[in-house]
Image (cartoon, rainbow, N blue to C red):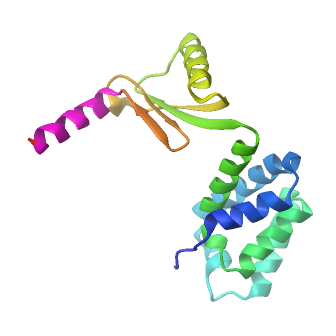
Amino acid sequence: MRKVRGVKQYAKKFVGNVAVEEISKALDSLSVIVSLMEKDKGFRNLMVSPMFTKEDRAKSLSVLSQKLQCSEKLTKYLGYLADEKALGALPEISTAILALYLEMKQRSQAVVTTPVAVSKEFEAELLAALRRRTGREIDVEYVVDPSLLGGVRIKVGSTMYDTSLKGQLGLLKDKLIEG
C-alpha cells in the first residue's frame, strides 16, 4: 500500500468546506469509519484495494454514510478521498482534522499517562496547571500504564512532559552511554 501525501492539505480542505459547528459530529463519524477500517480487513480492502471498482467504493460509502447519518458534505468528502485514492490515510487525515478543529476552538488535547489511577483533586490541579501553561482550554485523556513505575507523562499536542521514573531512568542511561 502506498503512502498518501498531503494529509494536512486534505484536512484543511475538509475544515475549509464544513461549518465549525458540523466538524465535531463529522469527527465522530470519521472515528467510526477509521475504527471499522482498523478492525475489519475486508472493509479496509474494499476502501483501498485496486481490486475493487470506484463504483463499489462509492456504493459502500453511500450505505455507510446513511447508516451513520453523515452530513452531505462529509459524504462528498469521503467520495473525494476515494477518488484521490487517499482513503488509506483516513486515520491520519482525521487526526489532522481534529488538530485543526482544536486550533480553531482555541483548545488543546492532552494525554496524561500515570502508573496508577489519579484522584479527582489531582485531575483538577493538573487541568488548571495545563490551562495556565498553554493558555488554552484542555481536553484531557487519562491513561494508566504501570510500566512508568512513578511520576507522570503528559503529551499536549506535540510537546511531551515526562517526569516518570521510567523516562528519567532512560535519560540517565543515555547520559551514561554518552560518557
Marks counted in the figure total: 0
Question: Where is 108 relative to 40, above or below?
Answer: above
Q: Quadrant of the C terminus?
A: top left
The answer to whether any part of residue 39 appears in the image is no
Side (left or right) of 97 relative to 75:
left
Q: Which residues are magenta?
A: 164-178
Q: Position of residue 78 (x, y in %)?
A: 77, 69
Q: Taking 129 as reference, is 154 above or below it?
A: below
Q: Quadrant of residue 87?
A: bottom right
Front residue of 124/146: it is 124
Q: At x 64% / y 37%, what residue is drawn?
A: 108
Residue beneath the point at 78% across and 62% down? 14
- Residue 47 picture quarter: bottom right
Q: Position of residue 173 (x, y in %)?
A: 17, 38
Q: Residue furthest right?
A: 72
Seen at 41% across and 26% down, the residue is: 152
Magenta stretch encompasses residue 36: no
Q: Is residue 26 above or below residue 163?
A: below
Q: Position of residue 129 (x, y in %)?
A: 56, 19
